[in-house]
């Protein structure tokens, strides 16, 4: 662990295509708080002192005003832009003209390489609420080990009744991640058992991942099938490290229930939860 404290990277550059707006700043709390406000509060209480926001450049001013300025009073805050041209092996104007949404979660972390540096770091999604216990479990592991890790959620605690979601279905062995495969259309009729461990992109990582992100992104672009929609997923890179480099990734089970904004119909239930939580 860095002597300067625990660092948390928050991926907040998504466009919210299914939701139809910027989920990162959508009010859910009684005083206009977003999920990010609650996530930052839980993370800071667990011991995270540095927060790196990965955002879209177009929402910089709005994001700082509604999110960052509040959180910067309690933690050291840094901003990174996930731009389409960032980290591209070569500029392809034709490719860029077809793409509107960010390249995905693995590209987001690659964009933040310089800001993260060589110390271990945690990663979360901006629009997912993971629960207080999950942050404590993650922080406790990171304090005693540089080993990569993942908070493992039970599938039944991560679904919405309003449509499909993407989840990383995990196979574990002796407390470690054996494999992870991203499924992009899971609903409450999922073929997997309710107790299946899934990834919600709540990771504890280290700098060993960056060479794999760089080479993986180049391979992703070379094999691109749909320039508008294909995404470079972080779990896919981690799975590659496990399969080819025997990387050890500890699975930290958590019974916390996930709350997130995937669809507009999710909002009333989420707002009710946070109004009762406050």
Image (tube, helix red, strand yellow):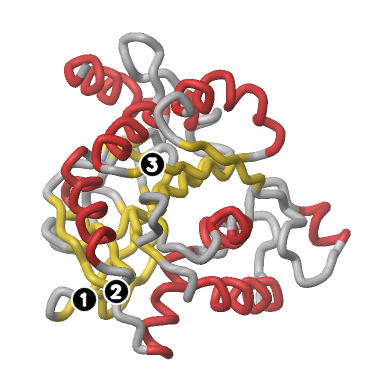
Q: Which residue is mark 2?
A: 249
Residue 82's spot in the image, x, y percent? Answer: 65, 49
Q: Are marks 3 and 2 in contact (CB under 8 Å)?
A: no
Mark 2, residues whose alpha carbon is within 10 Å: few (<14), some, or many (≥20)? Answer: many
The quadrant of the rendering that contains the C terminus is top left
Does residue 147 appear anywhere in the picture? yes
Q: Are marks 1 and 3 in contact (CB under 8 Å)?
A: no
Q: Which residue is mark 3?
A: 49
Side of 115 relative to 265 (left or right):
right
Residue 146's spot in the image, x, y percent? Answer: 32, 69
Give how far apart the Cα atoms at labels 1 and 3 are.
27 Å
Figure quadrant of residue 178: bottom left
Q: Are marks 1 and 2 in contact (CB under 8 Å)?
A: yes
Residue at position x 25%, y 45% from top?
159
17 shown above or below 227: above
Give how far apart the Cα atoms at labels 3 and 2 are.
23 Å
Comes first in the chain, label 1 or label 2: 1
Does residue 161 appear anywhere in the picture? no
Tell me the SS state at disc 3: strand
Q: Which residue is mark 1?
A: 176
Comes first in the chain, label 1 or label 3: 3
Comes first in the chain, label 3 or label 2: 3
Residue 240's spot in the image, x, y percent? Answer: 44, 81
Q: Between 174 and 40, which is closer to the camera in this rendering?
A: 40
Residue at position x 33%, y 54% from top?
202
Residue at position x 31%, y 72% from top?
147
81 shown above or below 108: above
Mark 1, residues whose alpha carbon is within 10 Å: few (<14), some, or many (≥20)? Answer: some
183 shown above or below 136: below
Q: Count the marks: how many? A: 3
Residue 248's spot in the image, x, y percent? Answer: 30, 80
200 shown above or below 120: above
């Amino acid at each position: 662990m860095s002597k300067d404290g625990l660092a948390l990277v928050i991926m907040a550059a998504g466009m919210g295509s299914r939701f139809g707006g910027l989920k990162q700043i959508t009010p859910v709390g009684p005083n206009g708080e977003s999920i990010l406000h609650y996530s930052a509060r839980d993370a800071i209480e667990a011991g995270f002192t540095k927060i790196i926001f990965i955002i879209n450049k177009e929402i910089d001013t709005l994001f700082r005003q509604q999110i960052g300025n509040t959180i910067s009073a309690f933690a050291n805050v840094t901003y990174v832009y996930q731009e389409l041209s960032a980290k591209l092996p070569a500029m392809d104007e034709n490719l860029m003209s077809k793409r509107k949404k960010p390249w995905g979660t693995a590209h987001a972390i690659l964009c933040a390489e310089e800001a993260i540096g060589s110390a271990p770091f945690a990663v979360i999604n901006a629009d997912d609420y993971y629960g207080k216990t999950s942050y404590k479990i993650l922080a406790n592991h990171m304090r005693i080990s540089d080993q990569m890790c993942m908070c493992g959620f039970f599938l039944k605690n991560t679904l919405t009744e309003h449509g499909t979601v993407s989840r990383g279905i995990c196979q574990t062995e002796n407390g470690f991640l054996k494999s992870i495969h991203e499924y992009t259309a899971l609903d409450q009729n999922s073929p997997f058992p309710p107790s299946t461990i899934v990834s919600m992109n709540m990771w504890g990582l280290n700098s060993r991942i960056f060479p794999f992100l760089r080479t993986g992104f180049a391979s992703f672009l070379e094999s691109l099938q749909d320039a508008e929609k294909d995404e470079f997923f972080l779990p896919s890179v981690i799975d590659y490290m496990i399969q080819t480099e025997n990387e050890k990734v500890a699975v930290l089970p958590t019974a916390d229930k996930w709350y997130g904004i995937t669809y507009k119909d999710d909002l009333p239930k989420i707002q009710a939860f946070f109004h009762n939580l406050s």
